[in-house]
Image: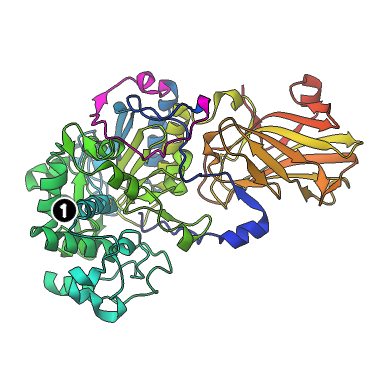
Amino acid sequence: MDHRMSRRTGLTAGALAAAGVVGLPAADAKGGSGGHEDDPAPDRSRGEPHRHPWDRKGSGKTLRDARPGAVGLDAEVLEQLPGIIRDGLEHDPPRFAGASLLVASRAGIAYEHADGYALRWQDATTELPEGERIPASSETIYDLASISKIFTATAVMQHLEQGLLGLEDRVADHLPRFAENGKSEVTVQQLLTHVSGLPAWIDLYSARPDVPSRIEAVLTAPLRTSPGSMYTYSDLGLITLGLIVEKLSGTGLDDYVREHITAPLGMTETMYNPPAELRDRIAATEHLDHHGYLVHGHVHDENAYSLGGVAGHAGVFSTARDLAVLAQMFLGGGRYGEARILQAGTVQGMFTDRIAEVTGVGGARRGLGPELAAWYYHAGLTSPYSGVHTGFTGTSLVIDPLTDTIVILLTNSVHPTREWSSTSVTRREVSTCVAHALGVVPEKIRGGWHAGDADASSATLSLAVDLESSAAELRVDLFAHLETAYDILTVEASADQGGTWLPLPGRLEATHEESVEVPDGQITGWGRRAAWDTTFTLTDGGTPLVGEVQIRLRLRTDRSTRGLGAWVGRLRVLDAGHELFDSDRSDDRREILAEGWVRGD
């Protein structure tokens, strides 16, 4: 996770219920669109249950180069990606100095792009002469920063499979010193899911003189909150897990990861402490003014550096292609080719949320290591099942199991300084572009009105009708993919010329999906990537609205982070079964007032 990204505290379930906001369903045992080519989901046309998208048999598929169209991606849409990267490079100040991007789907690497410089700056204010710069390429090796946590989590899960470790094991049973300062009951799972109560960070590199004293500081750090009561993203928890791996395996974390994860997967360009001869291929990071030198070739994270470059929270370097192999291993149910890294059930467990009861509706979601449903960088690919992680240096890895898609964006956003802008805007734009290339928005509704693809926006879609009976209803063809709890679509009506707006109760239905009740006309969430047939009753607390009634669909987004937005297709008003209004009729369509909504082709 990017330390600069301060996520808002999620609204509680009670607060959202009081506000009448309904998130479109996640359905614990159900998936969404997409699936494997060789391992298809049950046929939904026969009404069979959807298999969980992380319920994988382990096909062992390996990555190959592929044309976008052959793996379900629109090549024309993907051609927008270079412009997105270029915008990040040309932003003032630049969001990053260089970037390597990879998109794969159905085990096919369909798109790669690199731009900018692996090395551009001499210090925080001075650019190198052109001849001394190093262009970024698909071969550039990046400091993955916190994506390293996924390697540590994978190592932990391997020990779990061997019976050497349990999720409910007390950490202190493996590292007795950890019991100090009230931590005796903290569990392995709480470390993996960042609900242990540990602080996010402590200074190891300047506050302690050597590695033993720094490890002691980690193990004896006091809790900030009681275990299991609050989500606090913590480097200390993953450093501790790395120490457990070292104790149980009898080897260094770097040696363990190489022997049991990267070497079996053939990830020859993934390593801790890269050798000096690779320096010209490594993306430079920050110029440290107080030390007077540029970090180039060793880990950027100060605490990881102070621990010798190997730690559970940071330290791994890799290329986009190598990292894609790790991602494909997860999509393969723990298997890549002949290499079995994890059991399929272990992978599903890693990518299953464990903290919703702690964080509430709209809060963070975590599996056993992976970050899930992270709207701030999954963006258009967000679902309850999407993972995996970001890194402070400007790296991100996204897996969408609903379409078997991998999106990797590696940048050096802290080159030459961490004081410039965050990479998350570019991360979102890339993920959303890939979502459109996958056709996540159902084709049948793309020609309707669209809104909600900009931050801090407001849009209304309005019409007026004269109602006479007690059985009037609004019917809408709807697709919604809105950041849970923060971007909200409201369906409402007014019987007093807009003086008072009343939320309309409704019901959402889609083929082979469970129906959803919308008691107060407000919709948020990922929408299960379905086009919904929605019906809203034109009533005020059960009393029918009559006479001249104005109807509007009002969409508001907050100041940061968004999904694909909302699409509205056909709009109809039925009064006692009589079709009073139908947007498919050109005369009626002209009566619709669209403010902030844009109609498609």
Q: From the viewer's side, name the closer residue of 90 and 489.
A: 489
Q: Secondary structure at mark 1?
A: loop
Q: In the rendered structure, which segment of residues is drawn in magenta?
A: 46-75
Please name the residue shown 11% across and 58% down the image: 249
Please name the residue shown 23% across and 29% down the image: 62
Amino acid of disc 1: His
**Circle 1 Cα neighbour tier, 10 Å, few/some/many (<14 / 14–19 / ≥20):** many
The extreme bottom residue here reads: 181
Please name the residue shown 41% across and 56% down the image: 5
Q: Position of residue 163 (x, y in %)?
A: 19, 56
Name the residue beneath numbered marker 1: 298
Please name the residue shown 46% across and 63% down the image: 358
Q: Is residue 413 above or below residue 80?
A: below
Visible residue check, residue 448 = yes
Q: Is residue 22 above or below residue 189?
A: above
Task: Tell me the quarter of the picture where residue 302 sits.
Answer: bottom left
